[in-house]
Image (spheres, rainbow, N blue to C red):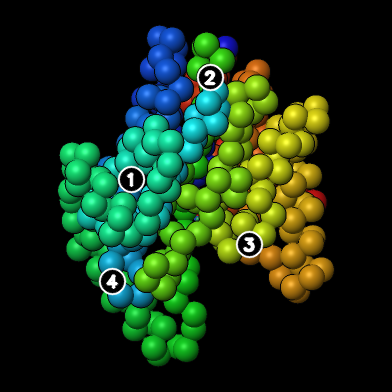
Amino acid sequence: MWGIIATWRMAVEGISEASHILENNGDAGDAIETAIQAVEDFEYYKSVGYGGLPNEEMEVELDAAYMDGDTLDIGAVAAIKDFANPVSIARRLSRERVNCMLVGEGAEKFAHKEGFERKNMLTSRAKIHYKNRLKEVQQQDIKPYSGHDTVGMVCLDTKGKMTSATSTSGLFMKKKGRVGDSPICGSGFYVDSQVGGASATGLGEDLMKGCISYEIVRLMKEGMHPQEACEKAVNELDKKLKARRGKAGDLSLIAMNNKGEWGVATNIEGFSFAVATASQPPIVYLTKVVD
Ligand code: SD4
């Protein structure tokens, strides 16, 4: 058995590439890195890698993470600028015993030393989006933050190894240095090959309040199917945030267990995700909100 599941439609080409690796008994680490790189490299996806939308100061600051479900090794970068594939830097960091999560300049210094490709990630298209948004914000007195589609994935290979990874430019027009859930273990992602994995997209500030990816893995460990675990975790966090704070941000989660069964839940309309397994060629689904 093998499988891979990912947030948003934009991941489907990447998971197709990963499928070829997985069906040839390739490694879940190589497959997920390949899949996420494909999303990072495509310039028209506005919230991941090259072409990602900038922060308040018109800089593209990227967050990414990688986790190995066999060893529980974790690597992450946050607010990193000018490197082509943050997920690969995160994976490289996951092999470090200490210093496995680096931010800003420290992450850039590490990436440079390790020979990762430098690249200006701000495209002219992203600059236009920024300038238009700035005008709207000034004229209509609205909040700048909008537009976010993080890619998050969970992968299972034929040897039973599982991995999870994320990559994002975070919220459009975020403050310089702002970090969301995506590089935070347990919030944006979690995986344990003995159970399964989960990954999140949505408003990082709220996803973090539930350590929601870990919560889903915990529920699967108690015996829940990934679908049941996703629904329970999303509904409970959504309700809790509304009860305590009057509102809940966007919360969308994907999960897969170590049998290749998968699940998804969201509190928004229009959340899409992509999945491929040994018995299911790559396909995109559009979800409905589950009450
Ligand atoms: C963040 N969770 O930085 C990310 C954004 C996101 O779909 O997921 N967008 O808060």
Q: Which mark is residue 206?
A: 3
Q: Which residue is found at the position 40% from the left and 46% from the top?
A: 99
Query: Does residue 278 show up?
Result: no
Instruction: Determine whether the residue tagged by mark 3 lies in a helix, strand or loop.
Output: helix
Q: Earlier in the sequence, mark 1 or mark 4?
A: 4
Instruction: Determine whether the residue tagged by mark 2 lies in a helix, strand or loop.
Output: loop
Q: Earlier in the sequence, mark 2 or mark 1?
A: 1
Residue beneath disc 4: 58
Does residue 89 appear to the left or right of 250 in the view shown?
left
CA neighbours of label 3 inside 10 A, class few (<14), some (14 to 19), many (20+):
many
Instruction: Determine whether the residue tagged by mark 1 lies in a helix, strand or loop.
Output: helix
Mark 3 to mark 4 CA distance (whole Å): 24 Å
Please provide percent x and percent y for residue 205: 58, 64
Amino acid type of the residue tagged 1 in the rendering: Pro
CA neighbours of label 4 inside 10 A, class few (<14), some (14 to 19), many (20+):
some
Please provide percent x and percent y for residue 181: 54, 55
Residue beneath disc 2: 161
Labels 4, 2: front one: 2
Q: Which residue is found at the position 53% from the left and 50% from the top?
A: 184
Residue beneath disc 1: 86
Instruction: Determine whether the residue tagged by mark 4 lies in a helix, strand or loop.
Output: loop
Amino acid type of the residue tagged 3 in the rendering: Asp
